[in-house]
C-alpha cells in the first residue's frame, strides 16, 4: 500500500515522505455544501441508498440521496462543491414517496442519464401506497416523472440493478422486493426466538427499445420470493452475458438462501445455480460488492450480513468463501455480539494497483444501544494480497447508523472518495451526534492511475452495463465491470479506475463489449480519463 501500514500499531504513513499522518480520509460534508440533516426517527425499514449520476453531462459526477420516509435529495456537483438541485430538476414531485434507493442508466440511449427509484409502497401495514417511478432526463435540465403503475404494483422494493440480459443494446432492470408481513417464531415455551416473514416476489422489467418496460420475472425464472434486499447483474461465469446474484434477508429463519441465477442466453431463461456453485448461504443478506480482489481475471463478490460477512472467490463460475481466512468476515463487535454490515465496496485507496475494501456499518433496532459505540465503519487495505484493518485513525470509523455508500472522485483531485449515508435511530436523540450523510475525502498521497469510461453504441447500451475491462500491467492483471448497482441500494461511479503505482503508462487494457466484440488499448498515459467506444475510438479527457 502506498500509505504504508506499520503492523502492530497500525499506523498509516505516506510512503513518499515517511511521515505519519493522522488519517487517510477526512469528513468534509459541511465544507462542500452537504447540509441536509436527516430530520427524524425512521422505523428502520426505509431509506439509505446513494446513487452517482452525471445529470448535466459536465463531467462532474452528481449524486442522489434516498431519504426514506423523509425528503430525498439530488446533489449537483459544481467543481467539488454541492448544491441541492432537487427542486431545480423537478424532483420535488417525488415528495410523499418512501424512497429506499435509486439506480441510474441511460435507458433510452439518448445521451443523458435517467434513473429509477425503488420505494416502500406497502407491507407490514405501512408504506406510501405508490408504485416505483422512472425519472427521464430532459436534456440535462430537468426530469420527467414516469409512473410505472401499469407495470408494477406497489410493493416493498428494497433495491434494483441494471443489466442488458438479452444483449439487445437496451438495459433491463431487476427489482428486489422485500417483506409483505412480519411474524414471530415462538418456541414451545412461548418465547420469541426469531423472525417469520412473508415476502413479495421480485420483478424483472424488460426494456423494449427504450420506449416501454414489460414485467417478465416469471417468464425468465427470476420471480424469487425470499425477501430480497440486494441484487447485482454480473457476468459470473465469464461467458459474455449477465447473470444475477440475489441476497435474501432473514435466511436463517426462512430457509431461503442467497441465489445465483445463471443466464442461459440466447434462451430466455435463468437457471438457479446457487447450491452447486457454493453461493447459497442462509443469512441476513445486505449488500453486494464486486471486485477482482485476487487479480486472476474474474469478478469476486463481498457479501454483507448481520454477523459474518462473506467473500466469494470466483473459481471458473463457482465459489470458495474466503472472508474469514483473509480477516474480512467482521463477524463480531466484541465477545459474542454480532456486528451489522451494509455496503462492502472494493476500490484502490492509494492507486498501488490492488483493491482495498470499505464496509459501511450500522446498527438495527434490535442491536441498539448495546453495540452503538463499538461497531464503526471499517477500512481494510490490501498489501500484497494480505488485508489489514486500518480503521483506527483512518477517518472513516464513524459509529452512526450507516447504510448505502458510493465511491467516486467528487473533486477531481486524482483519488477516490466515499459518500456514506446515515439513517437516524431513536438513540440519536440522546447522543447529540449529527445524523447526516458523510463525505469522506481521500487525503492519502496517491500514486499514478488511469480511468476508462466506456460509451456504448453499435448494439451496446449507452452506459455499457455488462461490459468488462481486463487491465494488464507489467506482471499483473485485474478484471473490472461497470457498476450497475452495488452495496445496499446504491451505485458508484461508472468510470473504471486502475492504479499504476509509480508507472507512467498502462501496459494494456482489453474491453469486452456486450455485442461480442473487443477493443485493445495500450500505453495509456497516467493521470487521464479515456473515453472508449466499440468502434475503437479513444478520446483522452483531462
Image: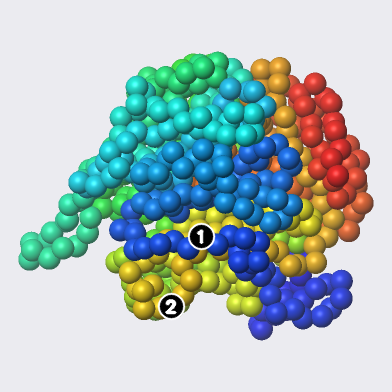
Evaluate if marks 2 and 1 touch, with contact meaning CB atoms under 8 Å apart: no
In the image, 226 versus 55, the foreground residue is: 55
In the figure, 144 relative to 185: above or below? above
In this view, which residue lies farthest toward the front? 88
SS type, badge 1: loop
Counting every numbered tag in the picture gives: 2
Q: CA distance from mark 2 to mark 1?
A: 16 Å
Quadrant containing the C terminus is top right
| Colour scheme | rainbow
| Classed neighbour count for the residue bearing mark 1: other residues with Cα under 10 Å, few (<14), some (14–19), many (≥20) | some
Q: Position of residue 455 (x, y in %)?
A: 72, 29
Residue 492 in view of the camera: no
Which quadrant would residue 479 be assigned to in this image?
A: top right
In the image, 26 versus 136, the foreground residue is: 136
Which label is found at residue 36? 1
Q: Taking 411 as reference, is 428 left or right?
A: left
Q: Position of residue 434 (x, y in %)?
A: 48, 71
- Residue for point 7% across, 66% down: 189
SS type, badge 2: loop
Amino acid at each position: 500500500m502506498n500509505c504504508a501500514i506499520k503492523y502492530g500499531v497500525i499506523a498509516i504513513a505516506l510512503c513518499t515522505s515517511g511521515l505519519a499522518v493522522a488519517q487517510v480520509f477526512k469528513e468534509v460534508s459541511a465544507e462542500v455544501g452537504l447540509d441536509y440533516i436527516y430530520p427524524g426517527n425512521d422505523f428502520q425499514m426505509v431509506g439509505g441508498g446513494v446513487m452517482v449520476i452525471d445529470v448535466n453531462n459536465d463531467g462532474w459526477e452528481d449524486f442522489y440521496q434516498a431519504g426514506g420516509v423523509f425528503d430525498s435529495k439530488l446533489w449537483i456537483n459544481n467543481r467539488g462543491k454541492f448544491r441541492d438541485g432537487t427542486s431545480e430538476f423537478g424532483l420535488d414531485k417525488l415528495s410523499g414517496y418512501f424512497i429506499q434507493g435509486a439506480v441510474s442508466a441511460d435507458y433510452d440511449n439518448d445521451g443523458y442519464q435517467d434513473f429509477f427509484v425503488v420505494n416502500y409502497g406497502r407491507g407490514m401495514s405501512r408504506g406510501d401506497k405508490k408504485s416505483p417511478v422512472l425519472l427521464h432526463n430532459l436534456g440535462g435540465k430537468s426530469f420527467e416523472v414516469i409512473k410505472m403503475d401499469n407495470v408494477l404494483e406497489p410493493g416493498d422494493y428494497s433495491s434494483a440493478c441494471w443489466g442488458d440480459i438479452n444483449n439487445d443494446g437496451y438495459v433491463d432492470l431487476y427489482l428486489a422486493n422485500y417483506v409483505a408481513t412480519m411474524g414471530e417464531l415462538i418456541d414451545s415455551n412461548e418465547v420469541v426466538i426469531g423472525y417469520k416473514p412473508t415476502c413479495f416476489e421480485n420483478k424483472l422489467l424488460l426494456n423494449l427499445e427504450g420506449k416501454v418496460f414489460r414485467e417478465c420475472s416469471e417468464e425468465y425464472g427470476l420471480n424469487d420470493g425470499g425477501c430480497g434486499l440486494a441484487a447485482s447483474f454480473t457476468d459470473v461465469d465469464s461467458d459474455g452475458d449477465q447473470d444475477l446474484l440475489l441476497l435474501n434477508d432473514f435466511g436463517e429463519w426462512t430457509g431461503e438462501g442467497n441465489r445465483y441465477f445463471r443466464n442461459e442466453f440466447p434462451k430466455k431463461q435463468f437457471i438457479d445455480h446457487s447450491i452447486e456453485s457454493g453461493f447459497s448461504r442462509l443469512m441476513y443478506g445486505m449488500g453486494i460488492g464486486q471486485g477482482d480482489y485476487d487479480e486472476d481475471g474474474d469478478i469476486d463478490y463481498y457479501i454483507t450480513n448481520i454477523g459474518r460477512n462473506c467473500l466469494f472467490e470466483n473459481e471458473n463460475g463457482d465459489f470458495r468463501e474466503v472472508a474469514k481466512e483473509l480477516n474480512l468476515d467482521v463477524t463480531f463487535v466484541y465477545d459474542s455480539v454480532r456486528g451489522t454490515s451494509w455496503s462492502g465496496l472494493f476500490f484502490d485507496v492509494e492507486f498501488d494497483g490492488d483493491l482495498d475494501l470499505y464496509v459501511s456499518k450500522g446498527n438495527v433496532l434490535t442491536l441498539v444501544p448495546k453495540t452503538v459505540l463499538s461497531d464503526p465503519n471499517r477500512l481494510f487495505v490490501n498489501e500484497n494480497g494480505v488485508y489489514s484493518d486500518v480503521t483506527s485513525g483512518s477517518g472513516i470509523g464513524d459509529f452512526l447508523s450507516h447504510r448505502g455508500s458510493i465511491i467516486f472522485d467528487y473533486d477531481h483531485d486524482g483519488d477516490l472518495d466515499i459518500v456514506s449515508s446515515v439513517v437516524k435511530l431513536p438513540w440519536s436523540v440522546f447522543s447529540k451526534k449529527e445524523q447526516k450523510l458523510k463525505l469522506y475525502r481521500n487525503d492519502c498521497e496517491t500514486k499514478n492511475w488511469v480511468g476508462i469510461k466506456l460509451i456504448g453504441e453499435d448494439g451496446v447500451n449507452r452506459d455499457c452495463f455488462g461490459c468488462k475491462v481486463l487491465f494488464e500491467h507489467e506482471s499483473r492483471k485485474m478484471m473490472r465491470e461497470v457498476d450497475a448497482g452495488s452495496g445496499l441500494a446504491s451505485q458508484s461511479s461508472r468510470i473504471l479506475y486502475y492504479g499504476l503505482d509509480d508507472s507512467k503508462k498502462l501496459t494494456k487494457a482489453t474491453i469486452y463489449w456486450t455485442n461480442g466484440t473487443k477493443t485493445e488499448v495500450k500505453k495509456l498515459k497516467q493521470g487521464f480519463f479515456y473515453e472508449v467506444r466499440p468502434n475503437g475510438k479513444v478520446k483522452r479527457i483531462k
